[in-house]
């Protein structure tokens, strides 16, 4: 897994890995290798999502007419 891997590519590989593991057709050694790969892919995807979440900001006008960056609030989506 390289740093240049895109999130979508990693997610597809993770989905394939999960599918392979769920099939029950792999040997124990192959299952362990797939599981290890899946954990790495899941960590990679999680890191990418965390980075993206931190980058999402909402710009709001303050009283002085200046723009202020505020962290994205996931709870605002639930309303």
Image (spheres, rainbow, N blue to C red):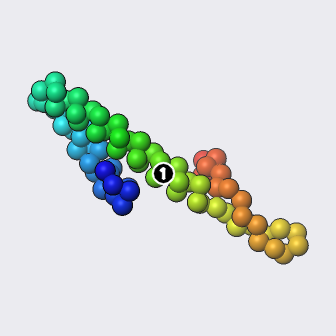
Q: Which residue is mark 1?
A: 49
> Is residue 3 toward the left or the right of residue 29 in the image?
right
The structure residue drawn at horizontal position 46% and vertical position 52%, both measured from the top left corner, is 48
Task: Kindly tell me whether residue 22 is visible in this rendering.
Answer: no
Where residue 8 sits, quadrant-wise, is bottom left
Q: Residue at x 53, y 54 (%)?
A: 51
Residue 3 % position (x, y): 38, 56
Picture residue at 16% right of the left edge, 24% below the top: 28
Q: Position of residue 64 (x, y in %)?
A: 88, 73
Mark 1 crowd level (few <14, some 14–19, many ≥20, 10 Å Cα): few
Residue 22, located in which quarter of the rendered image? Answer: top left
User: Does residue 69 appear to the left or right of 31 in the view shown?
Assistant: right
Across the whole image, how many numbered discs are drawn on residues? 1
Q: Residue at x 22, y 44 (%)?
A: 16
- Which residue in the rendered view is the most extreme toward the front? 2
Q: For the view shown, which residue lies furthest in the bottom direction? A: 65
Direction from residue 64 to residue 51 in the image, left or right? left
Q: Tell me the element at label 1.
A: helix
Instruction: Measuring from the top left, give residue 33's x and y in whole percent.
Output: 22, 33
Is residue 78 visible to us here?
A: yes
Furthest residue toward right: 64
Rendering coords of residue 75 (x, y %): 64, 47
């Amino acid at each position: 897994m390289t740093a240049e891997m895109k999130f979508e590519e990693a997610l597809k590989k993770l989905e394939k890995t999960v599918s392979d593991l769920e099939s029950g057709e792999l040997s124990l050694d192959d299952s362990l290798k797939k599981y290890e790969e899946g954990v790495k892919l899941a960590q990679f995807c999680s890191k990418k999502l965390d980075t993206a979440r931190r980058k999402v900001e909402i710009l709001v006008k303050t009283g002085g007419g200046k723009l202020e960056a505020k962290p994205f609030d996931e709870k605002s989506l639930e309303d």
